[in-house]
Amino acid sequence: MSNSARPLRHRALIAAALLLLWTATSFAQDWIRTGTGLGVERVRLAASDFAPSTSDAKNADLLKTFNDVLWNDLDNAGIFDLVSKSFYPLQVPGQPSEVNFLAWNSPPPNTSMLAFGNLNAAAGKVTVQGWLYDVKNEKSPQVLGKQYTDNATTDAVRVIAHRFADEIIFRLGGGVPGIAESKIYFVSERTGHKEIWAMDYDGANQQQVTHLGSISLSPRISPDGSRLAFSSITKSGWEIMMYSFDLNRMVSFPRFGGMNLSPSWSPDSKIAFSSSRNGYPNIFAVDASGGNSRRLTNDQGPDVSPTWNRKTGSQIAFVSGRTGLPQVYTMEADGTNLQRLTDQGYAVSPNWSPNGQFLTFSWMRKYGPGEPGSNDLYLMDVASKQWVQLTHDSGRNDFPCWSPDGRHIIFQSHRSGTDQIWTMLADGTNVKQLTFKGSNTQPNWSWK
């Protein structure tokens, strides 16, 4: 081969390698987006600011809250191509009679769907009228029309905006319910103790749930949202604790002896957890009241961090150190058919997707002396064991948890210099920080 031919061949090999890498990356992204419900064609949507019925200051404050929350909910959904407000016509509609179809369905907005409406606050009450129009269909444009009335408070207006956003997401997102009214539970040290806190899905309304003055970890909300199970250190050691939202207080739960950690709810409200009552930590399951205890693993693990298949309730994933470093395993709900999913490194904190197809977990794939590995989040198809990396060298990332619609993942990350709660779409894009005060860890998303 001539000297002049070698550079050409070298460049051709590099080009081929880059093409192969790009193809593999594109395939992986298409696979994950389709599997997590993000593969649907994005709807081009305009969300105009709702019009005020009066010009008083109270009305203006509530209106701004509503418009901001509605926009953020639709932006977070991950299924829309939201048209920038800089492209909107000067006159935005507050009523159906004010919709200028040509102005919206032509460039520059060139939108398919338009959300619009009005807000009125008077005599301590707020009324919101909202519509969703298909502006490409002038003869029969209305897709949605809703009216909401509540107390004229910021919190009430936030809820109305969440509900209207969820209605839009449900109708344009393939019939999958939105998550704007869902809740996040997490551990925070901001009071000087590790207590359980709750917040809206977008980080608003952060409120303390427990006041035990101890160390509480691993909050897990029940499928119906009525109870919160978690681990806390007591006079007798680490125990599974239970908080009732119906009663707004702690309720009794059996003490099992040994160290009891990381509870997890099944779809039919059984609870799996790790317990060292017989020596090494193994996985046990009980019913919702703590009775009918069953031992599911019997190994010198330790076996920890169980998570149920949220669709079927027939499988449990967990972490075991039975072969050395922690790895992710699955088994049937009765402890049979043990399968190892991860094959190397240090893998922890599995969480099962609502559709039962995927696990997400924290994985340091390179771990050992001289290895510069980092804790990143991965998503794995349980049947094929095919995986995709979601975060890339952005500090320590751990404790991922799925949203109820299967389109988002919340997680703990140290990327900002302290442990905080972050959220992203299930393909790893659209990453946003939700907590900022103190140290905040171990998030858990409500089932609905």
Image: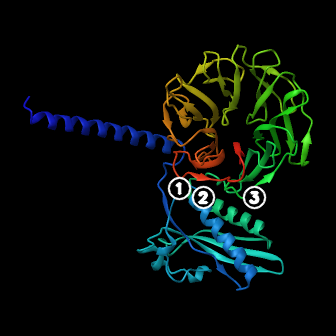
Disc on the earlier residue, 2 or 1: 1
The residue indicated by pointer 3 is: 205
* Tag nearer the camera, 3 or 1: 3
Q: Where is residue 22, by image quadrant? A: top left
Q: Is residue 74 above or below residue 415?
A: below
Check disc 3 and give the amino acid type: Asn
Q: Secondary structure at mark 3?
A: loop
- Please, is residue 160 above or below residue 91 in the view? above
Q: Which residue is mark 1?
A: 79
| Real-space CA distance between mark 2 and mark 1, rounded to the nearest whole angstrom | 8 Å
Q: Amino acid at mark 2?
A: Ile
| SS state under label 1 | loop
The answer to whether one can see residue 175 in this image is no
Few, some or many C-alpha atoms within 10 Å of disc 2 (few <14, some 14-19, many ≥20)? many
Instruction: State whether residue 47 is above or below residue 209.
Output: below
Position of residue 232 in the picture relative to residue 170 (left or right) = right
Disc 3/disc 2 C-alpha distance (Å): 22 Å
